[in-house]
Image (cartoon, rainbow, N blue to C red):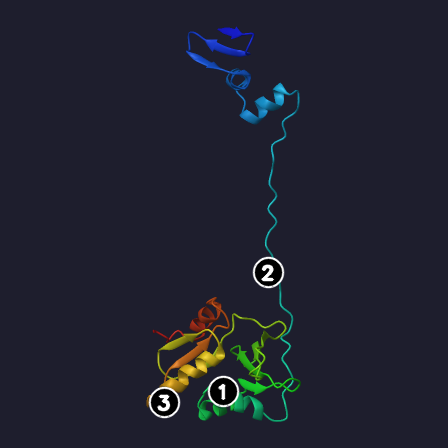
Amino acid sequence: MYIFKDSNRFYHWTADEKGGPIDFVMKYGNITYPEAVAQLLGERYEPYIQTVVPYEKEEKGPLIIPDKAENFKRTYWYLISIRGIEPEIVSVLMNEKKVYQEAQYGNCVFVGYDESGIPKYCSMRGTYTDKAFKMDAVNSDKSYPFVIGGKSDMVFVCESPIDAMSHATFAKLYGHDWRQDNRISLGCTWDGALERYLQWHPEIKK
């Protein structure tokens, strides 16, 4: 073996191996690259150990839904006259307590329930045409859908409650029974609410 003093490189004639100081220490000290660098620097190598903190899902508090207005006239007007929803559909959903009018600002309120009939999802939509307003209630859970129930094994998936109501309206206008098929809205583009709905209704095939 020959060590070149001017460059601190080595060459092992028999093994036909060559390299610099780090290569030499790794080869003949049988250690890793970080250990070789630390040894040449006169330091002690301490391997990095990454600590993985387990993820804890944030628990939501109770859903805080807006107070109901004494009457739902503004919401009824907005959904029928501005959004073109069939009056029958609006009335049915109001009777099912899935749609109502907020007391303070007159917003439309859409509610999704769990299997026990407890509100879990709540979104609001402004009724003033010159001011766009959309908001979810505090602690609203988007894994629960807004549901327009049906009797068939088919479910239509919409993004918003008004989209679902519009789809039902088109079915009625084309002479179909709008209560035949199921419709849900996700409140977003995430499909968590659909997954939950299919767990509730294994009979859904389409």
Q: Secondary structure at mark 3?
A: helix
- At label 1, the amino acid type is Ile
Would residue 13 be seen by someone viewing this image from the given angle? yes
Residue 163 place in picture, x, y as percent: 45, 79
Residue 89 place in picture, x, y as percent: 45, 89
Q: Nearer the viewer, mark 2 or mark 3?
A: 3
Q: Secondary structure at mark 2?
A: loop
Callout 1: 10 Å neighbours few (<14), some, many (20+)? few
Q: CA distance from mark 1 to mark 3?
A: 17 Å
Give the residue number, with chain letter if any, for mark 3: 173
Callout 3: 10 Å neighbours few (<14), some, many (20+)? few
Q: Residue at x 63, y 90 (%)?
A: 69
Residue nearest the observer in this picture, 60 or 110: 110
Q: Identify whether 159 is placed above or below 72.
A: above
Mark 2 and mark 1 lie on one chain; the one further toward the N terminus is 2
Q: Residue at x 35, y 82 (%)?
A: 152
Mark 1 and mark 3 lie on one chain; the one further toward the N terminus is 1
Give the residue number, with chain letter if any, for mark 1: 82
Mark 2 and mark 3 lie on one chain; the one further toward the N terminus is 2
Q: Secondary structure at mark 1?
A: helix
In the picture, the disc for residue 57 is: 2
In the rendered structure, are the residues bearing label 1 and label 3 in contact, judged by CB atoms less than 8 Å apart? no
- At label 2, the amino acid type is Lys
